[in-house]
Image: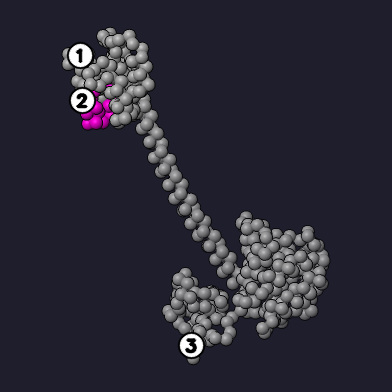
Amino acid sequence: MSEDVNAAPIKVLFVDDEEYILKSISRLFVDEPYEVLTAPSGAKGLTVLRGAEDVGVIVTDQRMPSMTGTEFLARAKEIAPDALRIVLTGYADIHAVVEAINRGGAYRYAAKPWEDEELLQIVRDAARQYELLRENDRLERLVRKQNEELKEWNTELERRVMEATHRLKKSFDDTLASFAGLLELRDPSERHHSCNVAAVAEALAVAAALPADEVETVRIAALIHDIGKVGGIDLSPNNAVQALTPEQWRSYKEHPVRGQTVVDSIEALRSAGVLIRHHHERWDGGGFPDGLRGASIPVGARIIALADLIDREMSKCRGANVSDLVLDAVRGEGSAGRIDPGLVPHARRVVPEVCSRAPRGAGHYEEEIDVSKLRRGMTLSRDALSGTGVLLLRAGTVMDGTTIAALARHSELDPSRTGVYVFREHSAA
């Protein structure tokens, strides 16, 4: 038993209309570890119950004026429902005993006059039973409290884990984005390419109903799909395939394998590395590095190849019908065997949306402002670059508290020679 339960003695209430019997009972229980309460009638007994908390045992005479023991126990049950109730009866009337049990919920009955040791044992048994009930109740309350605390703790732990996971994911994404921006410093014409391909590939993967984890893998792989070009031969408008020597062409075709090798040591990027390796494979089997054909090419790699094509075509097209021109190129490459023709319908849904994100035209003008004058809701009209040419934010970014703080921080670390270019809306005439 717990210390707080044993600290308070159990209260035992005796009810009898004969005063000498109450005195006799009080003497009998003087050495017992109970707090003895007495009442000379059922009405007085109810008054005692209302004023005394935690009465554990009630012993009442059956034959009393005004209120029988059975009637008293029935009413006492409403006031002290957990108390163990005992009825004393001097009659061999089984009906009175049955009524006391049925109406008053009597725990036991004892004959009157009683044997001292028998009555002591009956009350002791009832007191132990009450103590067990009280301890059980205490333990149930404790378990409920601990369960509530555990639930609150689990909820708090889950919240903290989610916050930590979100921070780790954001840090991971920021690291990849920064690395992609660093890769694009090799060629100013490629400045938007990695992030553009990642955005288009993600949209295509969603349109193709890929599972969420595969969509994320496609996005990550697309963001760093050209990582293998670092330190190797690259293609650019000034370095076309026709201008490469056979040795240079062989070196260029190694960059997907080199890219997979670079990221393979990072477990979180291993599945993305497979897509990086195969993003130059062709649907007709004429690609590199492994010459895979058709469905043997991982679907994520096929999506990245299509996203790469869409971004490069968008960079070449101008005018109001950019979307149509890009889709024409996609359909042509699908027919020519370069891309998966099964992805063309998804491109029809994605390309118009991508093209709609082009810089604003009529109704807006461009203004150069200081970083300190940036406000939430402003949209960048040009890429925001650091003083040494590192891409910080891309054109089209809508400013919020986080991006404004980031530009303010970078303006101190690597100040640009120019301000930030944003769209402004022409005032209505």
Whether residue 227 is visible to the viewer of this picture, yes or no, is no
Secondary structure under tag 1 reads helix
* Residue at 28%, 23% in the rendered image: 72
Q: Quadrant of the N terminus?
A: top left
> Which of the labelled discs sits on residue 21, or is there none?
1
Distance of mark 3 from mark 1, alpha carbons?
A: 103 Å
Q: Residue at x 48, y 57 (%)?
A: 163
Which residue bears the numbered disc 2?
44
**Position of residue 197 measured from the top left corner of the image (x, y, whole percent):** 65, 70
Residue 38, located in which quarter of the rendered image? top left
Return the x and y of residue 28 as percentages of the image width and height.
22, 13
- Which quadrant holds residue 243? bottom right
Q: Residue type at mark 3: give it.
A: Ser
- What amino acid type is highlighted by mark number 1? Ile
Identify the residue at horizontal 20%, vertical 14% (top origin). 21
In the image, residue 262 sits, relative to residue 235, either above or below, namely above
Disc nearer the start of the sequence (1/2): 1
Between discs 3 and 2, the one toward the N terminus: 2
Find disc 3 in the rendering and name its residue.
427
- Residue 47 among magenta residues: yes
Residue 54 in view in this figure:
yes
Which residue appears farthest toward the front when viewing the image?
66
Question: 79 or 324, which is in the foreground?
Answer: 79
